[in-house]
Structures are given as structure tokens and as C-alpha cells.
Image (spheres, grey):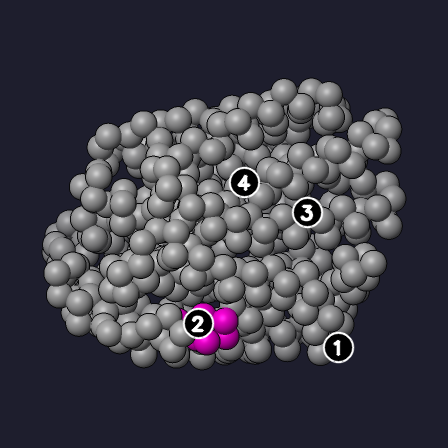
Amino acid sequence: MLSSSRRWWALALIAAAQFMVIMDTSIIGVALPRMQEDLGFSQENLSWVFNAYVVAFGGLLLLGGRLSDLFGARRMFATGWAVLLVGSVVAGVAGTVGVELIGRAVQGVGAALIAPSALTLLMMLFGATPKELTKALALYGAAAPAGGTAGVFLGGLITEYVSWPWVFYINIPIAVLALAATPALMPGGNAGGRGSVDVLGAATVTAGLGAAVYAIVRAPEVGWESAQTLLVLAGAAVLLGLFVVIQANRRQPLMRLSILRTPNLGAANLAQLLLGGAWIPMWFFLNLYLQQVLGYSAFPSGAALLPMTILIMVGMIVLAPRAIARFGPKAMVVTGLAVLAVGMGWLSLIRPDGNFWVDVLPASLLAALGMSLAFIPSLGTALSSARPEEGGLAAGIVNTSYQVGSALGLAAMTAVAASFGADQLDNLPALTDGFSAAFVGAAAISAVGAVLAAVTLHTGRQAGAAETTSDAVAATANR
């Protein structure tokens, strides 16, 4: 057993892992226009800088959890950092679109190994003491919005005053320190589990997701009814269907399908999927609007998004747990998604000659409030709905749902934006119309999520468990 001080140092490293995984999704946002100029991305394909990471991350999360069970959480945690380091180097030195996307995908693989093993290590360190576990989870949870905030700010700072490759190189010293500290800080054990690795299941779900995203992104250029679009979508459906068949017939699947019949678990995962599908497109196109329409350079663009990301962090840590305790998780999921929809609908009113204070700040803050209200209760409901012995599987599924929703939502809104003129970089009114259409589409996704959450989420034992968990986290976080 590690000493008390070493366990808290270990928690700092685990929180740093969560910080980095989330930061790597947000830090590239401000750098996208510079990367587009230097590497030759088209406006439609620019979203792949984000999607290459998210598809690999979301598609391989369940496999990462399984590998952690079989080979040991500490070993897979270290392996994930090593893979993330390699991917960061490749993404930074890339001189072509293809190499850049390979680097981002490798980063996603590293994140898929780090995230589940980090949570397993946290449970190994603090699971025996409920009071300490609650405090550890609160600190771990705060690392995610902190990473998002830092990514936005650092992305702007680095892109403006250094160069965009350093948004990837910043991972290198952190990964080296993590690799050096892991053997001394992290507990061993839980290695050598029996069973097989469902490589075919992981391959089919990742390939299916990637094919679906590719077809949707390419559709505005080649046509929605073109043979290419229809064939790739059909291939994606076959691969995802094959994944379901594999899971249903394997003795040790990546995901036991029957777990989705657990009350509220499927509904909460659907809310997370639609939340990711709405939020990430909004964040992506707001970055582009600030730089490509309003003419902001990288650092002011990153700074312009700080109020939104700070509100998310404060809302998730302080406001959401208290609201859940008073109104219950279902009410807050529905309310949060509805507020997010209104905020993005407001953002759709952007103008070619607009300004930050009128067109961006108030609407983005309202959207951020909705995000912070919906995310914590939907996540807590998904985790608390499963049996205790399946908590790891539930965590993997809900993380996958959010990442898959992010990838598919961004792909769909990229297609919508291109259809309404977002590919016309020299025509600001058309460009603005395209971004506006993407905000309308994201608002529609969030509104559908609010309706479905109202219909499918149920109060009762599971909701009470989620509320109790949120109360405990809030009490600890506010001491």
C-alpha cells in the first residue's frame, strides 16, 4: 500500500492525465486556420484534425479498458503516455495533411489507453475509503474543464507567439515526466487477468465510426446520392452491425450488450452522445468565425473563448452538483440541453460585420451554462445506473458515447456548413451563413436531446443514486 502522501501525488498524475486528454481536444481549435494555411487542408476536411483524434479515442476506449484489466492498469497507463508522446511528435513535425492526421490518430490511441487505466488506478488508490474516494473523484473531475480552459488559452498563446506545431510539442515534456513518475507513484497489481482481447470488435467499431464520419464530411463535395457516399455509408453500417454481432456472440466481449437494458443507462448515454454531437460543432465553428470572419488572430481568439470555458469549469464543479441536489438529475439534463439549444440558436444570429460583445459573448455564455448543467447529471446517471462490479464498463461506454457523438456531430455540421457556403473563404457573407447553419443544426441536436431525455430518463432509485453521488462530490469540492 502506498503512503498517504504518495497516493495524493499519484492522484496529481492521474488528474494530469485527464487534463491532457481533454486539453488535446481543445488546444488545436485556435491553431486550425494556421494549420489549414501551412498544410493545405480544405475547409471541409479541416474537421479531420479533430476527428482523427476523437475517432481513435472513442473507438478504442473499450479496448483500452480491457487491456488495462488484462495487462495491468499501471502498464497500460505508461504505454498510453508513450504512444501519446510519439503521436505528438508526428503531429508536430507533419508537413502534409496525411502525416498530420496520422499523428492525431496516434494521439487518440494513446488517450484511449490512458483514460480507462487512469480511472482504474484512482479506484485502486482510493476505493477502500469512501470519503477519500469522493475527494479524489472531485479533483479528477475538475481536471477535465481545467484542461479545456487551458487548451483554449494555450492554443492561442502558442499559435500567436511561437508556432502551431508547439500545440503538440507541449505534450512531450509532460509525457516524459509522467513516464518517469509512473513506476514510483502508481500501484502495481491487477495484471495477468484471464481472457482474450477482442481485437476484431475494436477494429470493426473504430473502422465503422471512421467510415461514417468520412462519408458525411465528403458528401457535400461528391453528393449525398453519389455512389461513393452511399457505398461508404453502407460499409460503415455493415462494420457497426458486425461489431454488434461480435459482441453478442463473444464470451468476453468489449461491451456486454445487455448492460444497455439497465434502467436509465441507455438514456443517459444517449444524452451524452447528443450533448457531444451538439457541443463540439459549436466550439469548432465558433473558433473559425472568430478568426475567419471577425479577423481575430490566434491569441485574441483563444482569449475570447476563455469566459465560456471558465463558466463551464465553475458550473460543473459548483453549480451543477447543487442544482442536481435540489431538482434531481433528470430535470437538470433536460434543462441543460434546452439551455444549450437556446444558446446555440442565439449564436446562429452571427453577422459578417459582427463583434465579440454582441454576437459571441452572451450567446456563448448561455450555451456554456447549458453544457455545465447537462454534462454532470447525465454522466452521473450513466455511472450510477450500472451494478458496482460493472462501473468500469459503464464508464467506458459513457466516454465512448460522448466521443462518438462528437465525431458524428462535427462531421454532420461540417457537411451542413459547407452546403450553406462555409467553403467560400473569400466571401464573408456566405462563410457566415455556413457557420450560422452549423449553429442551427447543433441547436437542433441539443433540442432533440432535451426532448428524448425528458421521455426516456426516469426518476427513482438510479436517479437518487446519481443525486447522492453528486451531493457528496459537491460537499467535498466546496470544503
Residue under circle 3?
A: 140
Decide which of 29, 62 is in the foreground and name it. 29
Asked if disc 2 and disc 4 are in contact, CB closer than 8 Å, the reply is no
Predominant SS along the magenta part: helix
Q: Name the residue located 65 percent from the left edge and 41 percent from the top edge.
A: 15
Task: Determine whether 411 is above or below 338 in the image.
Answer: above
Residue under circle 2?
A: 361
* Position of residue 401 in the picture relative to residue 240 (left or right): right
Tell me residue 258's x, y (percent).
59, 53
Q: Earlier in the sequence, mark 2 or mark 4?
A: 4
Q: Earlier in the sequence, mark 1 or mark 3?
A: 3
Q: Earlier in the sequence, mark 3 or mark 4?
A: 4
Q: CA distance from mark 2 to mark 4?
A: 26 Å
Q: Amino acid at mark 3?
A: Tyr
Q: Amino acid at mark 4?
A: Met
Tell me residue 101's x, y (percent).
31, 36
Q: Amino acid at mark 2?
A: Leu
Residue under circle 1?
A: 326
